[in-house]
Image (spheres, rainbow, N blue to C red):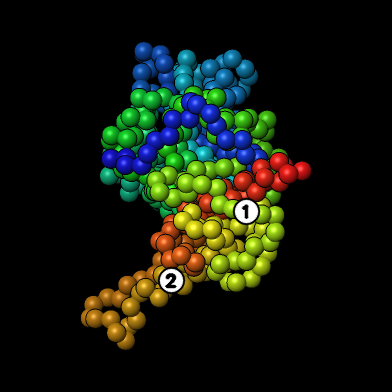
Amino acid sequence: VVAASMTDDRGGGADPSLGAFYACYLVGSLDPAMKGRSYVGFTVNPERRIRQHNGVIAAGARYTRRLRPCEMVLLVHGFPSKVQALQFEWAWQKPALSRAVREAARRLKVSDRSSSLANKTRLVMAMLHVSPWRNLPLRVHFLNPEYAKLAKDKCDAPPEHVEVSVGDMDALKRSVGGSFTDGKDLDDEKDDDGCDDSRVVTVDGDSVSEMPSISGARRRCAACGGEGVRGVGARVACPRCDCVAHPRCMASHFFASCVAAVPSRKHAGPGPQPLISRTLIPSGGPCPACGASLSWGAVVTAGRRTRAFAAVTHRAVT
């Protein structure tokens, strides 16, 4: 059961500097004859995309023509790159073919042929716990409160750094800076790795409750002790204290902590020795400053938050 708090974004909203917006979405038919049928897609502009699916403007997937009229039920966004979002979309569409998702799909009895809105909702909430996405600072936004309730009552709780919100399209726009990009959904010309990814992402629960105090000066890395923790994509942070670090240094610190936690063969008891997972992204570790146990997604989320706040502060000063 989802234990994380759900944020209602229908009132107010942040105004951070907007970075690249990559989202995977779930569309459902409003036609009684097609009740419960769905479509999973990728978009950089959900407001435009649902109009395309309903035939209001040109383009839109050919499959969704038989679903008209249709509504966008939910979105998952916060992907660092377009490639990662497209990988998530494919796994959501084809869970039985995805090595990462097939076990969760089998447990939930969701097949590639299943287009049930309920099943697709249950599957996407389970995918938030699957590597590599469980380490990303993703957000889930429900446009249909009925399926937000289903996720809360019937699905596993998301990782603690994942925020689940409920609201209309205007609320979603406010939460990511006030507007969506005009880029193409399937042929973006913008370089994924060169985008400004500094929009505000809120951490759930008892994580960040206030904006950390950020100045324009270069700050010292809490993991390596070096200076120069500054710039887009160059900072992660602890959501429990005011420290920041280079992403590579924090990852190395997390990996080292993981190795230290595994007993050596010399002192270990009989039986097979524990294996250390070889991954490019750590699942988490202790903060180098305060020692709090953190997930990788939480430190990336907090790093984005501090960058967005610094950008807003700089604009206010200038």
Q: Earlier in the sequence, mark 1 or mark 2?
A: 1
Query: Which three-letter amino acid code belongs to the residue tagged 1?
Result: Ile
Q: Nearer the viewer, mark 1 or mark 2?
A: 1
Q: Residue furthest top?
A: 32
- At which x and y percent is residue 38? 41, 26
Does 166 sit above or below residue 278? above
* CB-based contact (under 8 Å), mark 1 and mark 2: no
Taking the spot 57% from the left edge, 30% from the top edge, the residue there is 173
What's the CA distance linking mark 1 and mark 2? 27 Å
Q: Which x, y percent locates residue 267?
A: 29, 84
Answer left or right for 135 relative to 215. left
Number of marks present in the image shown: 2
Task: Give me the residue at 64% from left, 71% from top.
Answer: 226
| Near-viewer residue (126 or 307) | 307
Vertical position of residue 269 compared to residue 86: above or below: below
Classed neighbour count for the residue bearing mark 1: other residues with Cα under 10 Å, few (<14), some (14–19), many (≥20):
some
SS of the residue at dot 1? Answer: loop
Instruction: Looking at this view, name the residue that lies furthest to the bottom.
Output: 266
Observer-nearest of 189 and 291: 291
x and y percentages locating residue 288 in the rendered image: 49, 68
Residue 203 pos. (x, y %):
46, 46
Q: Badge 2: few (under 14), some or many (20 or more) residues near its Cα, within 10 Å?
A: some
- Which structural element holds mark 2? helix
Outermost residue to the right = 318
Q: Which residue is mark 2?
A: 257
Question: In the image, what residue occupies the spot 55% across and 24% down?
Answer: 170
- Residue 214's tag is 1
Looking at the rendered structure, the kind of residue marked 2 is Ser
Please report the residue visible at 55 percent of the width from the left and 47 percent of the height from the top.
211
